Image: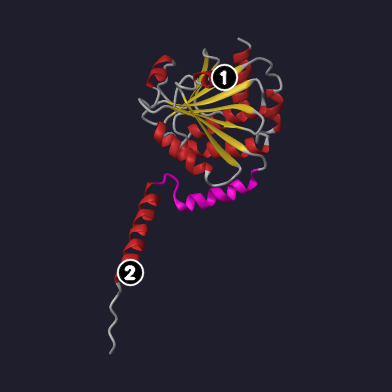
Amino acid sequence: MDSYTQSPGEAMAEKKETEEKKIEKKKEKEKLIKEKDREQLQQHFQTLQNPVTLVFFTQEIECHYCRETHNLLTEVSELTDKISLRVYDFLKDAEKASQFNIDKIPATLVSGEKKDYGIRFFGVPSGYEFTPFILDIITVSQGISVLHPETKEKLNHVCSNVHIQVFTTPTCPFCAQAVQTAHQFAIESDYITADMVESVEFPHLTHKYNVFSVPKVIINETYNFEGVLPEEEFAEEILKATQQ
């Protein structure tokens, strides 16, 4: 029987291939979005119509969640050429931060091709908040909210600036619905801006607004309510806040 001895060149090639597989396996393990989820997102993103820009504010030091947020946004933007990522330094690009009314980081804006809809994520848009984040991308791309006609009619009565802050935590399964509704309001009305604020990442704000349970919604700094409301009732609360 003839024996086969692997040549030095073949051995080196095999070793290189093995190392490359180890590196790829390590990279996959480090990814925040796993392969199965990436495939599902790519299917969802086939409905994107117009380009969407994720505008991210970060800084190199003293920002515990900036790197994780940056990595997540990068992975999302790599799933389709309809999504681009623009990164600014919170300190070095202070003028740009002021332009977008960014006063804390990590901060993510979901912006349309020609319009900033006033959608903000302060903190990592992961966990339960990943769902409204993806819906924001899709609806911003389409340029239309997914609100009921009755809710849209109520929002037509908003004629002054409204700032909504929805306080959340990573383990709150109900917070995502409140964030989703607030962001859809921002898409629907040019008068409304809406922020997701991660309570764990911004404890000074939870103290300022007396956040003891989530979701807690702050409207124009002084008006607030707790819990998840159907979108029409949420819209009613906005109207009440503007009448104060």
Give the residue pinned by disc 1: 99
Which residues, given as a range, are shown in magenta?
31-48
Callout 2 amino acid: Gly
Magenta segment's dominant SS is helix
> Can residue 230 be seen at all in this image of the molecule?
no
Q: Secondary structure at mark 2?
A: helix
Q: Nearer the viewer, mark 2 or mark 1?
A: 2
Badge count: 2
- How packed mark 1 is, by other alpha carbons closer than 10 Å (few <14, some 14-19, many 20 or more), is few
38 part of magenta stretch: yes
Quadrant where the image shows the N terminus: bottom left
Give the residue pinned by disc 2: 9
231 part of magenta stretch: no
Alpha-carbon distance for marks 2 and 1? 58 Å
- Which residue of the protein is positioned furthest toward the bottom in this rendering? 1
Residue 23 position in % (x across, y down)? 36, 54
The residue sitting at 33% across, 70% down in the picture is: 10
The residue sitting at 39% across, 28% down in the picture is: 60
Residue 156 position in % (x across, y down)? 71, 22
Residue 42 position in % (x across, y down)? 56, 49
> Can residue 184 be seen at all in this image of the molecule?
yes
